[in-house]
Image (cartoon, rainbow, N blue to C red):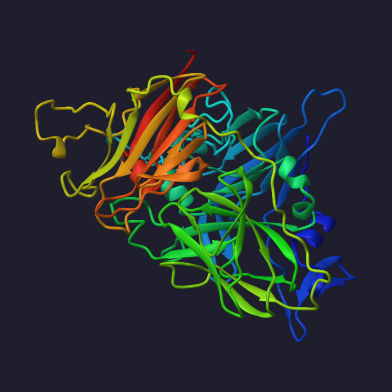
Amino acid sequence: MSKNVGISRRSVLKAIPAAAFALAASDGIFAQQHATAATAPFPQPALRTSRSAPGAPRAVLEQTLDVRLTDAFVPGYGTVTTRTYNGAIPGPTLRVRGGDTLRLTQINGLPPNQAHSGEHNRPHNENSFNLHTHGMHVSPSGDADNILREFAPRTADEVDAGAPEPQYVTAIDIPADHPAGTYWYHPHLHGATAEQIAGGMTGVIIVEGDVDEVPEIKAAADVVVCINELKVEDGRIPDFTADGSLTGVPSTFTVNGEVNPTITLRQGEVQRWRLVAATAFTVLPLHIFGGGPELMFHQIAQDGVTFPAPVLDQVVSLAMGNRADVLVQGGEPGTYELLADGVSEPLMTIEVVGPPVEPPMNLPRSLPPGKPFLDESDIANPGADREVVFHVDVAVLGQPFPNAYRVLGTHPTPAANPGGDATRDPAYGLFDPGYVNHTLALDTVERWTIRTDETMPAFNHPFHLHTNHVLVTHRNGQRLDPPVWHDTIGLAGGEPGDSVTFLVKYEDFTGRTVAHCHQLQHEDLGMMQLIDYVEA
């Protein structure tokens, strides 16, 4: 059961600063207004929350996600024909707690797939999907976070026969001790992921917990800032039919489905922004500029895991798939912009207006640690580190996809032609759904080194391991103090390209899943490996 309602009146009041609200008595709709002119309220995705049923052992969030082609209106851009969850970009925010069950019924109302007779590392089954709860520590098997399932649409014959649209269920039991934080969901069917996320088929998951009870955080507005990167051409998402079909289209960035929306903030007020890079192609180094002295980020979590204490910084860099929870405090009155290096337009506008908050709201000095650190002394086999190398062989395969996006290092997918030219091999280092690259035993701690051999800094291959967070201990050979938990790690090119070392413990769940590059065009074209979590 669930509260299938939009954001409550209380949530709106908390999420949007009170400095400039006017209640329209005739219809109960809130609107922000500046001193001289009204402006639209800061958008928030529809909110769904879990709820307990009498006698049930777990609270349940039960939600239908209806997926079909939608003429979605994007304020600041126009109408976009795209695949959506429930007709919106992004889909509803799902708010749960550790110990809850997430039960999602997904309706595939998309048209039949086009015929595909090519190999699996090419775009295909564009109207099939599945569901990945990105960053969550939940089962990768069965009807849970299983990205090896396929939720297919009706066939052409079934459409002609009037067959009902198929429905698929994802049921996830969230561990009681799951870290509280910000996560997101998106489709993850190999061959269709990039095109679907380029159309905004994403949504946010919030796991509530101890960090939300910190008094200074509890007092702050809790605001979802979901950044989508749309690839729109002639009012629609292009078909992924060639290497440049998506990357060759300029990106349109939205926040909660709008281009450059405006949020208001009072001087001295603290807001909690849940920054979500629900993107497929572009790294976002975020900073706030303008108005007066730069507003700073007080980062309290990375990829859903709370820091031991807030970290003050001017820039928070989000690779594709990253999340960061930050506290922002209003400074001098004026107009500011949330900018990303390399993106020409602001992502959103911040107006510091209205009477100051007296006394100014406080910022926390310490936080409940979201996850205990691992220790290198726990490594099961110090002489058997794993290595992952992201490597691209350019123009070695046939058109229209000439580049080979490979994962090398330890346990690469074997070559189709051993002893031949590996740079032109059609299988070497490319995803093979029948080949397990890494068998990982539960309750084992291992050390991995991940690097890219790209030479151009603009190229980034974010590494994402499903099911278990990883503790980054070194970046480019430099030890981090303290180390930082991630589920997705950006790796920029250079001479040399970036490298990271992390520790990881495989916990709780067995089953097959993947590790891959989260530049999702690269993943669809083969930059992925199969993982098998097994009992020790």
Q: Residue furthest top?
A: 536
Is 464 rendered above or below residue 234? above
Q: How many marks?
A: 0
Quadrant hosting residue 356: bottom right
Is 298 rendered above or below residue 288? above
Is 75 rendered above or below residue 481? below
**In the rendered view, does 14 fall on the left or right side of 45?**
right
Q: Residue at x 72, y 29 (%)?
A: 99
Q: Residue at x 81, y 54 (%)?
A: 8
**Which image quadrant: the N terminus?**
top right
Give 80 or 327, whichever is nearer the viewer.
327
Give 98 or 373, whichever is nearer the viewer.
373
Give 457 or 523, whichever is nearer the viewer.
457
Q: Is residue 320 visible?
A: yes
**In the rendered view, does 276 fall on the left or right side of 102?**
left
Provide residue 26's location: percent of width, then percent of height.
89, 70
Q: Residue at x 22, y 47 (%)?
A: 403
Provide residue 323's location: percent of width, then percent of height.
55, 50
Provide residue 61's location: percent of width, then percent of height.
73, 36
Q: Residue furthest left?
A: 420
Quadrant hosting residue 232: bottom left
**In the rendered view, does 196 fall on the left or right side of 260?**
left
Is 396 rendered above or below residue 41? above
Provide residue 77's location: percent of width, then percent of height.
53, 70
